[in-house]
Amino acid sequence: MRFSMRVVNFVALLGVCRSADGASARSSQESQMMRSVVLRFGAVCIALLLAVAPVLAQGQAAAGKAEDIKAMLLGTATWHADWTRPGDSGVSEIVFEARGDKVMAKLVRITPPTISCEHDVTITTGVVKFDGCLRQNVTLSFDPNDREYPFKGNSDGNFEWKLKRK
């Protein structure tokens, strides 16, 4: 609100500019056109700022700092995991929980045979590691540009994993 008042005051100031001989530097019509241009420019700048701010904020998480990734994993109630390899695929649900200084992954394999397990999680810059119920060494990389599947990677047995928020 204050910013728009400053723009209006600036535009008003432009309208009263005088040349050295005291004559009006701009006609009334030119002043109105200048005001309109400045106000539109200000509105476009504000709109761009509002549009870019969320992208910049995500870009900071995009750096993939371990604490940002941990917050993202813990801040999502349940993750949907698709895992595939030629001739085999399935779905699991994963809940990441904080337990003291550790993070645990509680996995439930939805694809038969339905089983569940819990394993420690290791989070480093841009990478999340844990064991699955039947596959070991699940290693996922964080991709800040993929809004649907921000975590993708592999496990033993040549399985590809993709996680998305449920």
Image (spheres, rainbow, N blue to C red):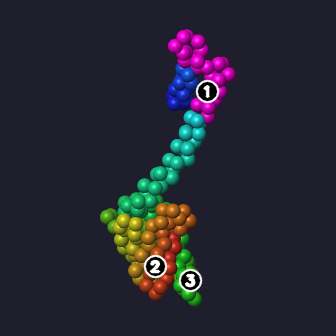
State the residue position of label 1: 35
User: Depth check: 50 or 137 in front?
Assistant: 50
What is the distance, in whole Å, between disc 1 and disc 2 at their CAs? Answer: 58 Å
Q: Is residue 78 left or right of residue 127?
A: right
Quadrant, the N terminus: top right
The residue drawn where x is 55% and y is 47% is 51
> What are the residue bounds of the magenta stretch?
15-40
**Above or below 39: residue 12:** above
Q: Residues within 10 Å of mark 1 (few under 14, many from 20)?
A: many
The residue drawn where x is 51% and y is 70% is 163
**Above or below 66: residue 89:** below
What is the three-letter code of the residue carrying label 2? Asn
Say what secondary structure mark 3 lies in: strand
Q: Mark 1 and mark 2 in contact? Answer it, CB < 8 Å.
A: no
Residue 102: % across, % down: 34, 67
User: Depth check: 165 or 26 in front?
Assistant: 26
Quadrant, the C terminus: bottom right
State the residue position of label 2: 154
